[in-house]
Image (cartoon, grey):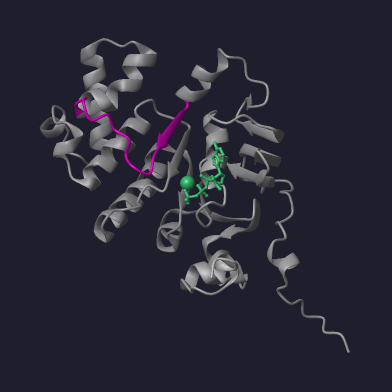
Amino acid sequence: MTSTVETWDAERMERPVPPPGEPPPDREVFIRVRGLHKRFGPRHILRGLDLDIYRGETLVILGLSGSGKTTFIKHLMGSLTVDEGELQVGRWDLRQMRESDWDDYRTGMGVVFQHAALLGSLTVEENVGLPLIEVEHLPPDQIRERVIAALRRVFLPAEEILHLKPASLSGGMRKRVGIARAIIQDPALLLYDEPTTGLDPVTVSGVNLLTRELQHSLGVTSIVITHDMEAAFTVGDRIAMLYKGRIIALGTVDEIRASDHPVLRQLLTGAVDGPLTEGFR
Ligand SMILES: Nc1ncnc2c1ncn2[C@@H]1O[C@H](COP(=O)(O)OP(=O)(O)OP(=O)(O)O)[C@@H](O)[C@H]1O
Ligand SMILES: [Mg+2]
């Protein structure tokens, strides 16, 4: 007798979710990814990524180290080119950008890196204002005004820290300064690459709440890469799981929480043994 209940064999475990269909009526696709592949020499890292990201949502991308999360957002940043597949962000087709398009495109995007990536020789004011100096060429008093507004948005005591160098700030403050820099140009898209790695739990919660708060106050579309399930559940509207180069699970927080996919279960429970760590032990 054959069972009708499908077992979780390797083929099913790695099976990508179907490509997105029509978006729900109240949703507009902002980022469209179809059949995206990336190879580094013989290593096939992205193996046909299909994904729609809606305008104004926060999408969390989960995945183990080395699964290609940063590689994916580097495509969105334009620091990696599309080898194969389609990648559309708003009105931009990233396969067909002219050299002069990139500045325009990047003005609409803020990036929060794993390590705040502030320049140690510059003050907070100079770090946060850098995009305005380099791209918008604004006069200093206008820059200061915008820097102060951005610092307040991330709940930092702007006037007190404007003249400090990053080394005089706590880790959590540096992270907030990094976020202030990412939002200084009112981006339509915010990319966070492991924004809370290496922070204490209280600061982690603070940064997670801030992500949520910014989504509401700026109406920005956000992509958050994290290993941290709690962070994913706090900040995400939807969660995507990247595994072996494809999206193998995608859903709302509740759907992902309830999923019986073994890869997600392992990440949720933190179990050492399971499909994620197969071959490593
Ligand atoms: N420029 C590159 N040249 C060669 N290999 C690369 C390059 N960039 C990334 N890779 C490889 O691609 C794979 C995915 O890397 P990526 O940085 O996207 O992983 P990740 O999911 O962000 O991991 P982590 O959680 O550790 O940050 C890794 O095996 C990495 O070695
Ligand atoms: Mg990474």
Q: Main secondary structure of the magenta part?
A: loop
Q: Residue at x 71, y 68 (%)?
A: 10
> Can you give x and y, in whole percent of width and height, for residue 57 in the image?
51, 45
Residues 223 and 9: in front is 9
Q: Is residue 51 left or right of residue 60?
A: right
Q: Is residue 204 left or right of residue 86?
A: left
Is 108 situated above or below 179? above
Q: Residue at x 32, y 31 (%)?
A: 181
> Can residue 248 be seen in the rendering of this structure?
yes
> Can you give x and y, in whole percent of width and height, for residue 278 in the image?
59, 68
> Can you give x and y, in whole percent of width and height, for residue 142 in the image?
25, 15
> Can you give x and y, in whole percent of width and height, for residue 213 in the image?
35, 46
Q: Outermost residue, right direction?
A: 1
Q: Is residue 66 left or right of residue 171?
A: right
- State the quadrant of the N terminus: bottom right
Report which quarter residue 16 is drawn in: bottom right
Q: Outermost residue, bottom direction?
A: 1
Report which quarter residue 205 is drawn in: bottom left
Tell me where the magenta segment starts and ends, as one range.
Answer: 108-123
Label tally: 0
Q: Is residue 121 magenta?
A: yes
Is 117 situated above or below 242? above
> Can residue 154 be seen in the rendering of this structure?
no
Residues 115 and 251: in front is 115
Is 114 situated above or below 107? below
Q: Is residue 87 magenta?
A: no
Q: Is residue 130 left or right of residue 86?
A: left
Residues 187 and 270: in front is 270
